[in-house]
Every structure is written in structure tokens, then in C-alpha cells.
Image: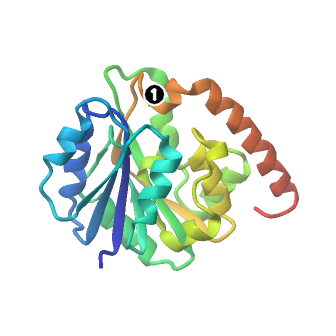
Amino acid sequence: MPLVSVVMPVFNGEKYVFHAVESILHQTFQNFEFIIVDDGSSDGTSGILSSIKDKRVKIITFASNRGIVDALNEGISYASGMYIARQDADDISLPKRIEKQIRCIGSDPGLVLVATGIKIIADEITDALKSIEAFYCSYGTKQEVRRQFRNLNSPIAHPTVLFRKIAFEEAGGYRKEFEFCEDTDLWYRMLERGEMAKICEPLVYYRRHAGAICYAHQAEQQVRYEKLMERVKEEIAQGKL
């Protein structure tokens, strides 16, 4: 049985998905399965995925596009590993990413999640993107991470995380009502069950482009994020975080 289940949703990702897959298959840590959820792609994604000949890869195909929350929950429901590692279809994981995360989370039973720093990759790297990169490479210790969450700042980049599957299940998984900020919603619920830390090293190349969710669904994301923050403020006031 694999120790880690890597879960990657993809929708119309033909431009980047091959390199994303290769970055996982060439990890120095090899005790994993790789669950890829094709979320109703209508481009060449399915053909690229079907060409992969690696026994660790399991492909789940949706007949139509159902969204990232359904894709992630479905993929994780098939996972047999103790730990879940996230990968996005347009990002690149550096070779030692999973090895370093397993070493970190395995050294502290109180940790439910370990993230990493990122390096932004895009056609054009603007000053704004550089500031985002610096933000995600800060706040590594458990105390620092929790303090940032209490200050309503998430220091965790979704495609960098590795977390305990049991903590994910106890927290209730990703929720459809917070799609497009489903990760931040989950982190706050998981913080009620343990601590989080971050390896302050850019172990994921994080791609910013016009088709990314943060751009394509920006208005919906903002509305749901504001709703989430109202709930979080109440929980902080009640001492839950």
C-alpha cells in the first residue's frame, strides 16, 4: 500500500499537464500512487493522460465538467495512502518535494499539514507576482502559520500541500459552497484538529496564467471568500482558533 496518494484534478489542461505529471513521476520519494481526475476535459487532455504508462497512475474520468471540489473529493475518496499530496495540472513539483514533506510531517505527530514555498512561473513575471512569491515563502513554523491564519491571512498555497488523510476526513473534506476558495475553508477546519507548518523553500513552481481559477472566477471567489471570513471571525472570537 502506498504511503502517499498524489491527487491532481485537470480540466482542459493539454498545454501543461504532461510536464505536471512528469514532475510527480520523477520524485525522489517513490512510495506513492498518482490519482488524476479528468474533470470533463474537451481538449487533448484525455489523449495525453491515456498515453501515460506507469502503474502508479490511476485516472478517473468525469463525463462532464463538475468543478474542482467534486474532482478533489472524488480523487481523495479513491486514495489509499496515509497522506494526500496535492498537485495542479499547470504546476511543477521539484524532485525532492514529497521527500522533504514526508520527513517533516513524520517528525511531528501534531502536524496535520505541511506546505512548501513556491516560485511563480508565468509568461511575464510582474512586481505583483514577485510579491506573492515572497509572501508564500514566509511564515514557516507552526506558531507563525497559526498566527497568520488568525490574522485572516492564509500562508498556504493549495498545490503545495501534503496532509494527513484522516484529518481531511474528520474536517469534512472540501465544500462546494466555498468553491474557488475551497482550500482556505478546509485549512481553517483542519486547524481545529492540529497544527500546520511550511518548508520555506520553493519546492513547487506555481504557474500564473489567464486560465487559472483565481483569474477565471475572480468575482465568485471574492464573494465566497468574504462569506468565509465572516464565519472565521466568529470562530476566532469564540476561541476556536
In the image, farthest residue toward the front: 63
Please determine whether, in this image, residue 189 is positioned above or below residue 194: above
Name the residue at 87% across, 60% down.
238
Where does residue 110 sit, x and y in percent of width and height? 57, 76
Name the residue at 45% across, 72% down.
105
Please determine whether, in this image, residue 214 is positioned above or below residue 198: above
From the viewer's perspective, is 96 left or right of 137?
A: left
Q: Amino acid at mark 1?
A: Leu
User: How packed is label 1: few (under 14 Cα within 10 Å), some, or many (20 or more)?
Assistant: some
Q: Nearer the viewer, residue 224 or 60?
A: 60
> What quarter of the picture does the N terminus occupy?
bottom left
From the viewer's perspective, is 74 left or right of 95?
A: right
Asked whether residue 154 appears in the rendered view, the answer is: no
Q: Tag 1's secondary structure?
A: helix
Where does residue 207 sit, x and y in percent of width and height? 36, 34
According to the picture, the residue beneath numbered tag 1 turns out to be 129
Asked whether residue 40 appears in the rendered view, the answer is: yes
Q: Count the marks.
A: 1
Q: Nearer the viewer, residue 61 or 131?
A: 61
Where does residue 176 sit, x and y in percent of width and height? 62, 46
Task: Identify the image quadrant of residue 81.
Answer: bottom left
From the viewer's perspective, is 194 left or right of 241?
A: left
Its colouring scheme is rainbow
Task: Identify the image quadrant of residue 29.
Answer: bottom left
Please determine whether, in this image, residue 177 is positioned above or below residue 34: above
Name the residue at 63% across, 24% down.
219
Name the residue at 36% across, 72% down.
103
Where does residue 218 sit, x and y in percent of width and height? 58, 26
